[in-house]
Image: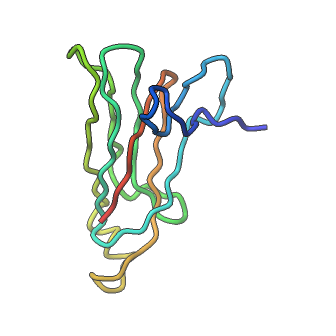
Amino acid sequence: GNMSAWKFGADQPPKFGWIANWHVTNVSTDHDIVFDVQMVRGSAILEYLSTYENIGTATCQIEDTKAHNISDAYFLDGLWKKPFSLSSSVELHAHPFAVKQIQRDTSDPWKAAIRCTSHNKKFKILSVSTC
């Protein structure tokens, strides 16, 4: 079977999130997590953990319903030098030409996905919101 590297849980109760490579005893082959979302403007905010140790990186992008990339790939690094842990956020933007092809009217919601790929170390996503 295909084991996902991602699990939902609280590594520091009560701080829940989607955590990649949390328990490294599992050899995971699937490093992707996909969030099915609805968009109007083609933008998303992804919140993730920044901390000073035992954290890695991930790459995230917006995809259409056929799993084609419709945004740039955003590289997220959870490691920083500050001696504490906080949430960081990144804005993801779909390419305007892709949005025009998908959306009939500028106020119509449309289906998309946000795919994040972990890069072998622990990585924690705290929230995903779209507009």
Residue 97, compared with residue 80, is above or below; it is below
Q: Is residue 8 above or below residue 95?
A: above
The residue nearer to you, when weighing 13 against 115, is 13
Quadrant in the rendering for residue 83: top left
Q: Quadrant of residue 81?
A: top left
Left or right of residue 24, residue 18 in this image: left
Residue reaching furthest to the left: 82
Could you tell me how many numbered marks the image carries? Answer: 0
Q: Using the image as rendered, state which of residue 36 and residue 96 is in the foreground.
A: 36
The N terminus appears in which quarter of the rendering? top right
Question: Is the residue 73 above or below the residue 123 in the image?
Answer: below
The residue at 41%/33% (across/down) is 58
Residue 105 in picture, x, y percent from top left: 31, 86
- Residue found farthest to the right: 1
Left or right of 96? Residue 70 is right
> In the picture, residue 5 is in which quadrant?
top right
Query: Compared to 38, does 3 lie above or below?
Result: above
Q: Position of residue 57 (x, y in %)?
A: 39, 27
Q: Residue at x 45, y 64 (%)?
A: 112
Q: Residue furthest front?
A: 14
| Residue at screen point 66% across, 31% down | 29
In percent of width and height, residue 77 lies at 32, 28
Viewed as shown, does residue 50 lie left or right of 3?
left
Camera-nearest residue between 74 and 83: 83
